[in-house]
Image (cartoon, helix red, strand yellow):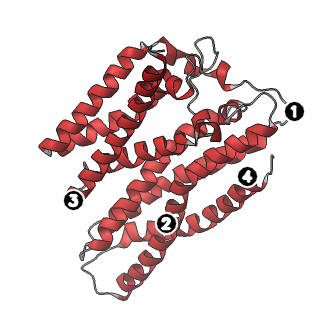
């Protein structure tokens, strides 16, 4: 296994997550099976104390896992320097058969883990603790997602061979690539960009009309649409190269780490927007979601406008 200080940190944290996550799993199972808020028995009193313990553990794990996603991408970008042929995190992801599955699973998990945190926050504000059984049941499933992610992460780092030549992002993110991403380049980039802005208009429509299901669904669709538009169109304007489509290189210092801002805006905007379908969120959360999505659209559009003003043409 490739054990840089950063990877070792992930390994140690994963061991802690397994130990404490398993404790929370057992407690959550008991709470789901036996919880009765109206009961006044000693058993219910014990379950309430165990619920507080389980909640504290899960909040710690999921809160760290959401925050650690960007740290994980940072690690991939950093260890690309020691892998032959890799120029950024894309080469590390493509270096093993587990990398692509792990990235997809991590993206799914940060939304699911954040959803649990949202449900828990709602439950803590509810005097009746109406969501206690629901969040316990949800954790029973999310525990499996957590374990699968940790297993894939361990397998990926264990399978990395420093002296093995891997593909660079230029060959991975191209129409001639043998990877699954090559099929993306069959799409018309201008059609994808048009759908990107149309999608944003539907988000705006849902926001101003306060139609929460339109708003939530539009935010859900906005995740893959934004990523496709970034790879096919907007990324080339950030790099100012028509052949450079990598979604990882924008995280590097040569591009002022703008990728971290882009992905942060996308996550916060879409997560709060999607969560509106589960809860009647406050007007502030509507505003934050719409604001972050708007900032994302403005930021990506800025690179296109800036390139046109500098060069008088589009890529």
> Residue 142 in the image: x percent, y percent?
48, 54
Mark 2 or 4: in front is 4
- Residue at position x 87%, y 33% from top? 163
> Residue 14 in the image: x percent, y percent?
65, 58
Q: Which residue is mark 4?
A: 7
Count of marks, rendered view? 4
For mark 4, give the secondary structure.
helix
**Can see residue 211?**
no
Mark 1 or 2: in front is 1
Which quadrant of the structure image shows residue 86?
top right
Residue 282 badge: 3
Q: Which residue is mark 1?
A: 163
Name the side, left or right, on which 67 lies relative to 313: right
In three-dimensional space, the C-alpha distance between marks 2 and 3, rounded to whole angstroms, equals 25 Å
Give above or below for 272 relative to 199. below
Q: Which residue is mark 2?
A: 58
């Amino acid at each position: 296994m490739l054990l840089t200080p950063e990877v070792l940190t992930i390994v140690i944290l994963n061991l802690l997550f397994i130990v404490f996550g398993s404790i929370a799993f057992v407690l959550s199972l008991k709470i789901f099976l036996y919880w009765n808020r109206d009961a006044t028995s000693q058993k219910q009193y014990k379950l309430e104390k165990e619920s507080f313990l389980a909640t504290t553990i899960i909040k710690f794990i999921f809160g760290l896992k959401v925050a650690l996603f960007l740290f994980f991408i940072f690690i991939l970008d950093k260890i690309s320097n020691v892998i032959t042929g890799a120029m950024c995190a894309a080469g590390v992801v493509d270096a093993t058969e587990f990398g692509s599955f792990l990235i997809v699973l991590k993206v799914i998990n940060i939304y699911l883990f954040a959803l649990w945190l949202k449900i828990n926050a709602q439950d803590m504000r509810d005097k009746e603790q109406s969501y206690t059984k629901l969040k316990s049941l949800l954790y029973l499933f999310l525990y499996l997602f957590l374990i699968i992610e940790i297993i894939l992460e361990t397998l990926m780092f264990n399978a990395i061979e420093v002296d093995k030549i891997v593909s660079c992002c230029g060959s991975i993110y191209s129409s001639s690539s043998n990877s699954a991403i090559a099929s993306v380049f069959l799409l018309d980039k201008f059609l994808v960009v048009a759908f990107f802005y149309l999608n944003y208009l539907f988000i705006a429509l849902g926001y101003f009309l306060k139609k929460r299901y339109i708003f939530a669904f539009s935010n859900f669709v906005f995740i893959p649409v934004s990523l496709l538009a970034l790879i096919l169109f907007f990324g080339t304007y950030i790099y100012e190269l028509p052949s450079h489509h990598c979604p990882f290189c924008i995280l590097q210092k040569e591009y002022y780490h703008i990728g971290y801002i882009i992905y942060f805006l996308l996550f916060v905007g879409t997560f709060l927007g999607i969560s509106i379908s589960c809860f009647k969120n406050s007007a502030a959360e509507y505003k934050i979601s719409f604001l972050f999505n708007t900032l994302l659209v403005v930021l990506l559009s800025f690179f296109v406008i800036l390139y046109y003003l500098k060069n008088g043409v589009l890529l």
